[in-house]
Amino acid sequence: MLKLNPPINENKSFNNFSMKEKAPISKINLRGDINNKDFVSRVGKILDLILPSEVGSIVVKKDISVVTTTPNEWLLISNNTTKSNNENLKETLFDNISISNLGAITDVTDQFTIFSLSGPNTIEVLSKSSPFNFDTLSNNCSAQTLLNNIDVIIIKKDNENIDLLTRRSFSQHLW
């Protein structure tokens, strides 16, 4: 992995709202058939969790968060910045899932950046630039939508803490 400098090197705060770019962390795209018991079993053993099947659901473990983005796709986001653990996970998934043709593993760490938004006005600020109804999104759930005409994945922790994942190439414009 290349040594990347974050595209945004500042924090913004105003009117009970703040945003910053998180430090680069590991992100792995996992694809497979949720109805394939061998796929689900292997992934479950590797991640030590039951793979969520409902789109938008999130499972959080100590080291990793699993975001269901489509019926057959998950985004695995590291909850820490220890690179050795992330590399081991990627290799283990690749060896057990991709090589055996049960699914596909893609490292998307360099593709996405994450903005951390916080404060009591977070939902109000996001609502002004998106057609998505944020009132319908429960805590600890995700959704994909447009924000200022840019594709984003929203990870809602609660009403005052939201992470936005966007492609690195659009990060300056979104900021």
Image: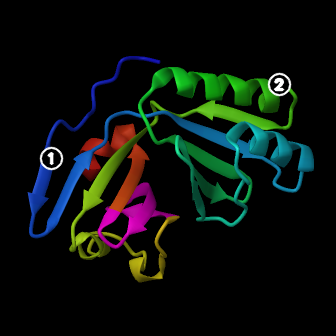
Sequence order check, earlier mark of 2 and 1 = 1
Q: Cβ–Cβ below 8 Å for labels 2 and 1?
A: no
Magenta residues span 143-161
In percent of width and height, residue 96 lies at 80, 29
Residue type at tag 1: Asn
Return the mark for residue 145: none
- The residue lying at 63 percent from left, 57 percent from top is 68
What residue is disc 2 on? 99
Q: In the current view of this chain or complex, which residue is farthest to the top? A: 2
In the image, residue 145 lies in the stretch drawn in magenta:
yes
Say which quarter of the image contains residue 125: bottom left
Say which quarter of the image contains residue 167: top left
As drawn, is 136 to the left or to the right of 172? right
As drawn, is 102 to the left or to the right of 89? right
**Looking at the image, residue 101 lies above or below residue 39:** above
What residue is disc 1 on? 11
Residue type at tag 2: Ile
Cα separation, mark 2 vs mark 1, equals 42 Å
- The residue lying at 69 percent from left, 66 percent from top is 54
As rendered, which of 17 and 172 lies closer to the eye? 17
In percent of width and height, residue 32 lies at 78, 45
Quick one: SS at disc 1? strand
In percent of width and height, residue 139 lies at 46, 71
In percent of width and height, residue 155 lies at 45, 60
